[in-house]
Image (cartoon, grey):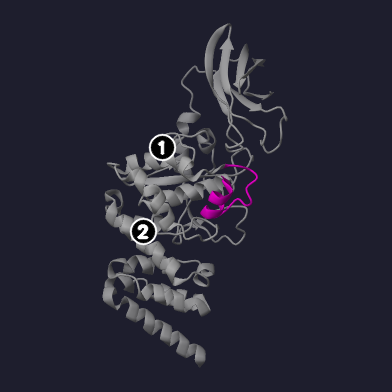
Amino acid sequence: MKNLFSFLFICLSVLTSCSNNKKSCEKYQALIDSALVKAGENNSEILTALNNVDDEKKEGMAFLISYMPEWDLKRLNSDFILNNVNFAYKVKNQYPWCSSLPDSVFFNEVLPYYNVTENRDDWRENFYNRFSPYVKDCSDIRDAIDSINKNIRNELLVDYNTKRRASDQGPFESIESSMASCTGLSILLTDAFRSVGIPSRFAGTNNWFDNRGNHSWVEVYIDGQWYFTEYYPQELNKSWFAADAAKATIGDKNHGIFAVSYKPAECYFPVVWDENKNINAVEVTQRYIDVCSYAINKSAGDSRVKLEIEVYNENGIDKNHNNRVAADLTLFCDGNQVGGGTSCSNKDDLNNVFYLLVDPNKKYEIVVVYQGKEKRVFSEVLEADKIERIVL
């Protein structure tokens, strides 16, 4: 009998909280009722959030609670939930690229407070204060995305590092330790985008086509289309992993590409650390095959092969690439310079390797310059792709 009275009280409280905005709340009524029961002893915190949000924000709050994971329903307090909703609506009213969004996109890709399984840090206000100055003079969403992309690393001082404590660190742990995995970096970038009203979502693959491991990145929504980017950015829809993404397998949980959704979607996001399959997702493999085809479709008659180059310090080649360094590279063939660039360091993703397309069956000279020291290496490239690992 006590449980029955408790349930009736919850239902009455929900009806009261939505009475000021009945139309926007009634479609969530059954979901909210269920959420409050799942919240158990924490349902008073959830009710406080529902009852204390402004009318303008009622539907957003109803959406957030309706699809909130049970683990969060049982532990998040009202201050956390209200702060998240209030700052999300603050940027909705402040930035034209956010105010013009369909509610479905704002609710699912700006309003959420987490990405995957990371710690639930109360990052909204902190990130708004950090990143709003970078977009204050931006004329449109593309300018805003570009500004966040260019400045996030220097603002947060977090770099890719295999020594990070966990793959799915919360944003504050990554900032405190100054290191993160590709997952942690993607969490930081998604939260930074959302903090200034840019719709963003976490994306990635559980395993590349050649079984060398997973990778994560970020998608942003512009004028009805999704584009991909990273913490260490190139231009939108361009990245070192494009050729790998173009070879993903549609319908394959292991080798496909997926984007996270806050609300329930067609499938779950496949990651090795989430055995309970609690991360909602949509499959986006076909889009990546289409968008990234440029990276594998050579022009007619192009018979060049890939020469990959990694440079390691005097400590030698190591499994986790901790000794890998960013060195200046110049490539010569028959006395003529045919290419150059900078090798990837231990701050880059393990799968990211500098490469140049070269003509096969030729001998190349690689000039390596690092911290004032120069080393020359000769590489004979035959009919297939080749990797040169150079120890200084």
Which three-letter amino acid code belongs to the residue tagged 2? Ala
* The magenta segment: 160-179
Q: Position of residue 314 (x, y in %)?
A: 71, 27
Question: Quick check: can you spot residue 305?
Answer: no
Q: Quadrant of residue 138?
A: top left
- Identify the residue shown where x is 42% and y is 72%: 31
**Quadrant of the snapshot with the C terminus:** top right
- Judging by the rendered image, the residue that carries numbered circle 1 is 236
Q: Quadrant of residue 378?
A: top right
| Label 2 element class | helix
- Identify the residue shown where x is 50% and y is 18%: 302
Q: Residues within 10 Å of mark 2 (few under 14, many from 20)?
A: many
Q: Is residue 239 left or right of residue 168?
A: left
Q: Position of residue 74 (x, y in %)?
A: 52, 73
Q: Residues within 10 Å of mark 1 (few under 14, many from 20)?
A: some
- Judging by the rendered image, the residue that carries numbered circle 2 is 88
For this orientation, the residue located farthest to the front is: 372
Q: Position of residue 151 (x, y in %)?
A: 43, 40
Q: Is residue 116 magenta?
A: no
For this orientation, the residue located farthest to the top is: 335
Which three-letter amino acid code belongs to the residue tagged 1? Leu
